[in-house]
Amino acid sequence: MALGALSHIAFTSSDLDRSAAFYDLVLGFIGYTRWPAVAGQAKWKKPGVGIVLIYTAKNDRAHDRAAPGLHHYAFEADSRAEVDALHALLAANDVTTLDAPADYAYTSGYYAMFFADPDGLKLELCFAPHAYTPPPT
Ligand SMILES: [Zn+2]
């Protein structure tokens, strides 16, 4: 464990079974394992990395990433090839891709793709080899 490291993140879903199938696909690709969860939730773990939880939504309001709250969540990739491979996997499973893999100027070498979960939550897989490199002085 590391002080400040992300422990877990919980998303809400309007349809737990539909979302669980989606997250099985995505999280399975990036190495998470489905884990037993309490009723009304689904859980995936990747030891040493994190825990993703899905809670059943308590109302039917649509997610709005432009409103206060979560804008998007990014998972790390170890290579550009992994970003491309997830893009291909999602396309083969009719998952909405928001932005195909591309280079971004956020940090040197940043390469990412963006997609949406079944409730429209924006997700990202990024290869950011210099994300934690201190800025030049
Ligand atoms: Zn991002």
Image (spheres, rainbow, N blue to C red):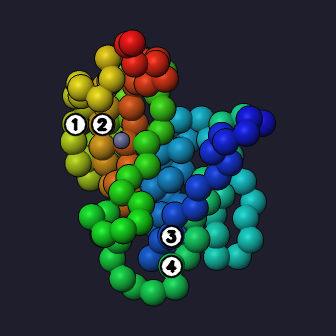
In this image, 66 relative to 76: left or right? left
Q: CA distance from mark 1 to mark 4?
A: 29 Å
- Residue drawn at x 47%, y 45% is 26
Number of residues whose C-alpha sits closer than 10 Å to that of mark 2, classed few (under 14), some (14–19) or many (20 or more): many
Which amino acid, mark 3? Answer: Thr
* Dot label at residue 100: 1
Classify mark 1: helix, strand or loop: strand
In this image, 63 relative to 29: left or right? left
Callout 3 touching callout 4 (CB < 8 Å): yes
Q: Mark 2 sits on what residue?
A: 113
Where, quadrant-wise, is the N terminus in this rendering? top right
Is the CB of the residue bearing disc 1 within 8 angstroms of ligand 1?
A: no
Looking at the image, which residue sits at the far right?
1
Which amino acid, mark 1? Answer: Ala
**N-term mark: 1 or 4:** 4
**N-term mark: 2 or 3:** 3
Q: CA distance from mark 3 to mark 4?
A: 5 Å
- Residue drawn at x 43%, y 49% is 73
In this image, 78 relative to 101: left or right? right
* Dot label at residue 57: 4
**N-term mark: 2 or 4:** 4
Classify mark 3: helix, strand or loop: strand
Classify mark 4: helix, strand or loop: loop
37 vs 60, nearest the viewer: 60
Callout 1 touching callout 2 (CB < 8 Å): yes
Q: Mark 3 sits on what residue?
A: 12
Residue 116 position (above or below residue 114): below
Residue 112 position (above or below residue 52): above
Number of residues whose C-alpha sits closer than 10 Å to that of mark 1, classed few (under 14), some (14–19) or many (20 or more): some
Q: Position of residue 58 (x, y in %)?
A: 52, 85
Classify mark 2: helix, strand or loop: strand
